[in-house]
Image (cartoon, rainbow, N blue to C red):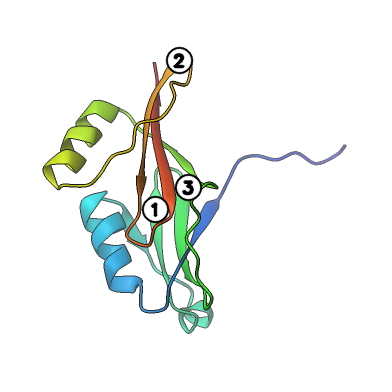
Amino acid sequence: MSFQFTGIHHVQLAAPEGCENTARQFFGELLGWSEVPKPKNLQKRGGVWFQCGAQQVHIGVQQDFIPAKKAHPAFLVEDLDALCRHLDQKNVFIINDEPLPGAKRFYLKDPFGNRLEFLEWE
């Protein structure tokens, strides 16, 4: 093939209408991600975008929203233990799962019920 994939630009998570302020509090304030301005022509759809390392996470409004309880993005973290302590101090419920060889990881639910994984390779 003459083409190749070079990575992931963004992951989109669905959320209910009116989610923007809650998303800003969770992804922006709690996780510390920077908000990325949406292009003007897409602003009418609602939602909010964030920068997470080299990738973006787009929170998009879905009319018939149902949280993703199994499908999920996994975010690479440097010093996962520090993130875990930070979230614990903010009373965020962390879900431990089966070990993944060579990694430390945990899950949590975003404010809309979507499953998110955070991991650090050892």
Read off the residue under disc 3: 55
Q: Secondary structure at mark 1?
A: strand
Cβ atoms under marks 1 and 3 closer than 8 Å: yes
Q: Is residue 69 above or below residue 117?
A: below
Mark 2 or mark 3: whose residue is earlier in sequence: 3
Kind of residue at badge 1: Gln
Q: Quadrant of residue 85?
A: top left
Q: Position of residue 31 (x, y in %)?
A: 27, 49
Kind of residue at badge 2: Gly
Q: Position of residue 62 (x, y in %)?
A: 52, 73
Read off the residue under disc 2: 102
- The Cα–Cα distance between marks 1 and 2, rounded to whole angstroms, is 26 Å
- The Cα–Cα distance between marks 2 and 3, rounded to whole angstroms, is 23 Å
Q: Position of residue 110 (x, y in %)?
A: 35, 54
Category of crowding for the residue at label 1, using alpha-carbon neighbours closer than 10 angstroms: few (below 14), some (14–19), many (at least 20): some
Q: Does residue 39 appear left or right of residue 104 in this picture?
A: right
Rendered residue at 45%/55% (across/down): 57
Read off the residue under disc 1: 51
In the picture, the quarter occupied by the C terminus is: top left
- The Cα–Cα distance between marks 1 and 3, rounded to whole angstroms, is 6 Å
Q: Is residue 99 above or below residue 50?
A: above
Q: Does residue 26 appear left or right of residue 66 in this picture?
A: left
Q: How many marks?
A: 3
Q: Is residue 26 above or below residue 119?
A: below
Q: Quadrant of residue 5?
A: top right
